[in-house]
Image: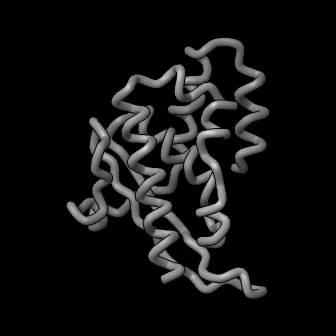
Amino acid sequence: MTIDTLQSDFELLDDWEDRYRYIIELGRALPAFPDALRTEATKVRGCTSQAWLVSEVQPGGNGSGPVLHFQGDSDAHIVRGLVAILFALYQDKPAREILALEPETVFDALGLKEHLTPQRSNGLTSMVARIRADAQAALA
């Protein structure tokens, strides 16, 4: 799933009830998250529900620098779908590209900020901060 595909799919859905269902379906399509990774160290702070995020740094080709691969999960269906949206934006991208991305632009285009509760928005912001911190650490 790419962010462009996601935006196109969102445009086809007329109301937010349909979009919420779509976000939930995106979350259901995430690969299984190993129970062994459900630790305090992988838990995302700032989420009302429980969410876990793990990044794996891989060498990049063509001088692009380190690339990050993510695994994630949540005990809440919507948050799990938000994890899938973040993966569409960041999965297997070079750390420099991750740091250069402006996720708020994408979230605004999808209408997420105005249709998520403040708690969900805070959780989304926390997940983005964690991804950006992991990208920064990969470059260090």
Relative vertical location of residue 14 with respect to residue 59 in this rendering, above or below: above
**Residue 109, image x, y percentages:** 69, 31
Closer to us: 54 or 103: 103
Relative vertical location of residue 59 with respect to residue 54 in this rendering, above or below: below
Closer to us: 100 or 69: 100
**Residue 96, image x, y percentages:** 64, 71
Q: Residue at x 78, y 33 (%)?
A: 8
Q: Residue at x 76, y 42 (%)?
A: 5
Asked if residue 47 lies left or right of residue 114, the reply is left
Closer to us: 22 or 4: 4
Q: Residue at x 27, y 67 (%)?
A: 36
**Residue 44, image x, y percentages:** 32, 52
- Colouring style: one colour
Q: Residue at x 61, y 62 (%)?
A: 98
Q: How many numbered badges does the structure rendering display? A: 0
Q: Which residue occupies the extreme left position in the image?
A: 40
Asked if residue 139 lies left or right of residue 125, the reply is right
**Residue 125, image x, y percentages:** 44, 43
